[in-house]
Amino acid sequence: MEIERVEVEKLKELQDSARFLFFTPKNIEITDISFRNEGRKWSTLRFVCDVGGERARVKEFFLDWFYSGFPKSLMQSFVSSYSPVEMKNMGEGVYFFGRNYKNKDASSSFFLGTQVEVEGDSMDTVKRVTDALHAPFLIDKFKHLSFVDRSFFARGGKPEWFEEERISRMEWRKLEGETLGDSLRTDSEGVLRCDENVAERIVIISEPYFRRVIWVDSAIPDSQVGNLFYELRESNGLFIVRKMGHGIMADAGRMGPAIYQEKKDGNITTITFSPLFSYSEINSLLPQLEWKFGMPHNLFK
């Protein structure tokens, strides 16, 4: 059975086999718990919270078809949002509050590799549930679990949309773990070939528990393949877009996330940073990332 009704007592057992960490709100009862096992679609955990007579619905999963840490349920396009977005830094993650694709009060958060989406009857209820979230079963297997191991589409899941196809059509492998700075390590690599030539390459770089994540996404637009990159352009509601060096930078403030995109010699490199990277870290990492993993230095190997 793809969708399984779950009792609270069974969550710990279920966590052992899941590919993402579960988050539940402290001191708030959860009901109507269900878990969708991998099958036609990726696995998700859902539950409901009743807070002061109002209801909040929570959905959790591993977001692999878009850049890590971006509040996708609040985003209308690559960098625009459905409404103004409020951000809150909580140490292990950043909360984003706004209106979602259903025009409901909602939050989107990225905690230790898990995408958590909360939708409620009011923003106050959404914030109360989001603020109370914690990981009750922080087990060791997630400390070095790679993108490939977590990802539904990198392991052969069937896509329905072009964003999903961008991941599923690549050949993925785990990397050895070259260090970058104090805690970042190369995690996984995806390569898309066209007529035996490389058309796109994605390198995932992560910290333990997937706390912070970088994507280096390099492509050759002239390849006979569609949807090789997202066009970075002016936006409203979330990101500030400005020129930086030879490229364009878009960031959502000091807490992130951030995007850098550069077009050079017929190639396009998009580097994204999940929340919790500071401006100084991004400025320090960008030259290393472009040289080590961007076009054209290491693509054709």
Image (tube, rainbow, N blue to C red):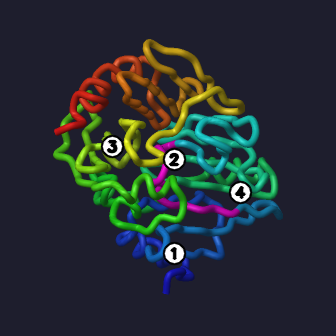
Disc 2 residue type (three-letter): Phe
Name the residue located 47 percent from the left edge and 78 percent from the top edge. 10
Q: Residue 79 versus residue 52: which sits nearer the camera?
A: 79
Disc 4 residue type (three-letter): Glu
Residues at marks 1 and 3, CA–CA distance in whole angstroms: 34 Å
Percent of width and height locating residue 285: 34, 23
Residue 120 falls left or right of residue 231: right
Q: Residue 199 carries which label?
A: 3
Q: What element carries label 1?
A: strand
Q: Which mark is residue 92?
A: none
Residues at marks 3 and 2, CA–CA distance in whole angstroms: 30 Å
Disc 1 residue type (three-letter): Arg
Name the residue located 59 percent from the left edge and 57 percent from the top edge. 26
Q: Residue 119 carries which label?
A: 4
Mark 1 vs mark 3: which is more N-terminal? 1
Count neighbours of disc 4 (C-alpha within 10 A) and say few if under 14, some if 14 to 19, many if 20 or more. many
According to the picture, the residue beneath numbered tag 1 turns out to be 36
Q: Residue 213 versus residue 265: which sits nearer the camera?
A: 265
Q: Are the residues at dot 3 and dot 2 in contact (C-beta closer than 8 Å)? A: no
Mark 3 vs mark 2: which is more N-terminal? 2
Mark 4 vs mark 1: which is more N-terminal? 1
Name the residue located 65 percent from the left edge and 73 percent from the top edge. 31
Q: Residue 139, relative to residue 131: is it above or below? A: below
Mark 4 vs mark 2: which is more N-terminal? 2
- The magenta segment is 57-69
Residue 297 falls left or right of residue 154: left
Membership of 5 in magenta stretch:
no
According to the picture, the residue beneath numbered tag 2 turns out to be 110
